[in-house]
Amino acid sequence: MQIRNSIYFLTAVTMVSTVAACGGNHARHENGYTTTAVVEWDSGPLDANYRREHDALESRHRDEMSHARADEAANARDARQASETRDLEDRYRRGKEGHMKDLPPSNHNGDHQ
């Protein structure tokens, strides 16, 4: 009995504290309840877009390794490819943070074939 009364008391204190912290707005709803709609973001379209771009980038990078350009040193190519990979990962991160369906535009200034 003592534990049950303590739980009721703590629940009542928590409810009063919550209403007070929210300025009492929640207590003014017509039915006495607050409804919060939770909209879940579907990351599927962004993930698919990322996977397509990632696979294309990896394929192009492998091709560039196999068929090195005469006008680009290996260390310059490696640095450029690393920068392109970081850019794609950054775009994906920004897309997730913004709950986007497509990858945001690139901030990468490098030119590739």
Image: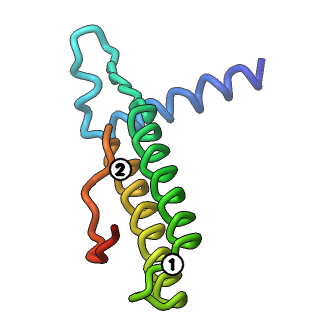
Residue positioned 26% across, 76% down in the render: 109
- Figure check: 29 above or below 13: above
Residue positioned 32% across, 37% down in the render: 101
Q: Nearer the viewer, residue 80 or 49?
A: 80
Q: Residue furthest top?
A: 31
The kind of secondary structure element at disc 2 is: helix
Where's residue 84, x and y in %? 42, 70
Quadrant in the picture for the N terminus: top right
Residue positioned 33% across, 49% down in the render: 103
Q: Is tag 2's residue or tag 1's residue first in the polypeptide sequence?
A: 1
The kind of secondary structure element at disc 1 is: loop
- Quadrant in the rendering for residue 48: top left
Name the residue carrying label 2. Answer: 95
Amino acid marked by disc 1: Ala
Judging from the image, the colouring scheme is rainbow
Name the residue carrying label 1. Answer: 68
Q: Nearer the viewer, residue 95 or 60?
A: 60
Mark 2: give few (<14), some (14-19) or many (20+) Cα within 10 Å: many
Where's residue 107, x and y in %? 27, 69
